[in-house]
């Protein structure tokens, strides 16, 4: 116990900094893993699990007073941190999970049939090939549609309904998925993620 470092992490007394930013967690090779809270990031710093960081420190968390030194623990949290540890080999091949918020975000909240922009509540996950006709629930078979267009198309293929897609579906990359999942993305985090998003992504549009 003790030592010269001021680090009271095991006590776990980090004060909640209030409405805080999310920290982008990477693996050691720089691949995005997750959005974590600054408190969770502080835990990684304190257990010496952070391999490297990007950008300037953007939040300082203060913990309890260390008995050995009388100092209050203090951890500077960066907006992007890379965490030590083995990299699961399947991470590259993983297809991001499909959800309505991410699907609508991918498609910029635009209905693929009428082209109008709608609020979240007015949008639906539309299966290009209907599930009842063998279509799967996947990024490539799903597109954003307004309730009216989805209802009009019903159980038909687009060509049967004489409705054409104004844009095409695609599978988001790992970096794009992190953007779609992010709630409050800081500019340096966005810059880092966008740099690896393929050109065909609508996020560049
Ligand atoms: Zn529509």
Image (spheres, rainbow, N blue to C red):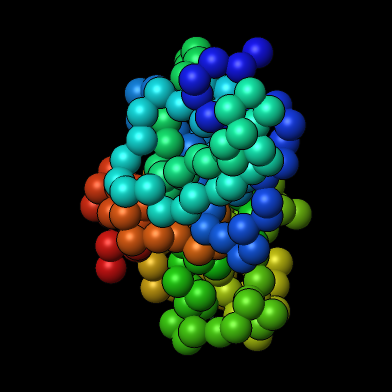
How many tags in the picture?
Answer: 0
Q: Nearer the viewer, residue 16 or 86?
A: 16
Answer yes or no: is residue 98 visible: yes
Residue at the image point whose x is 72% and y is 36% from the top:
12
**Quarter residue 27 falls in:** top left
Q: Quadrant of the C terminus?
A: bottom left
Q: Percent from the top left, x then y, of residue 119? A: 60, 83
Residue at the image point whose x is 46% and y is 27% from the top:
50
Q: Nearer the viewer, residue 198 or 25?
A: 25
Q: Percent from the top left, x then y, of residue 95? A: 53, 36
Answer yes or no: is residue 102 visible: no
Q: Percent from the top left, x then y, of residue 140? A: 50, 49
28 left or right of 145?
Answer: left
**Quarter residue 120 falls in:** bottom right
- Image: 54 above or below 1: below
Q: Nearer the viewer, residue 171 or 71?
A: 71
119 left or right of 67?
Answer: left
- Image: 174 above or below 90: below
Residue at the image point whose x is 62% and y is 58% from the top:
17
- Image: 57 above or below 19: above
- Image: 112 above or below 174: below
Residue at the image point whose x is 49% and y is 84% from the top:
117
Q: Percent from the top left, x then y, of residue 164? A: 44, 73
Q: Quadrant of the N terminus?
A: top right
């Amino acid at each position: 116990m003790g030592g010269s470092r001021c680090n009271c992490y095991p006590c776990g007394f980090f004060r909640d900094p209030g409405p805080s930013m999310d920290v982008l967690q990477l693996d050691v090779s720089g691949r995005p893993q997750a959005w974590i809270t600054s408190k969770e990031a502080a835990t990684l710093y304190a257990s010496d699990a952070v391999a490297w960081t990007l950008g300037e420190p953007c939040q300082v968390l203060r913990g309890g007073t260390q008995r050995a030194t009388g100092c209050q623990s203090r951890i500077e949290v960066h907006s992007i941190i890379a965490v030590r540890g083995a990299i699961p080999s399947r991470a590259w091949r993983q297809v991001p999970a499909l959800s309505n918020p991410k699907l609508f975000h991918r498609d910029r909240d635009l209905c693929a049939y009428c082209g109008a922009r709608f609020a979240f509540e007015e949008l639906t996950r539309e299966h290009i090939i209907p599930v009842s006709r063998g279509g799967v629930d996947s990024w490539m078979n799903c597109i954003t549609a307004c309730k009216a267009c989805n209802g009009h198309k019903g159980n038909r293929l687009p060509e049967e309904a004489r409705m054409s897609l104004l844009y095409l579906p695609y599978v988001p990359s790992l970096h794009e998925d992190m953007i779609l999942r992010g709630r409050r993305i800081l500019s340096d985090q966005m810059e880092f993620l966008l740099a690896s998003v393929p050109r065909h992504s609508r996020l560049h549009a």
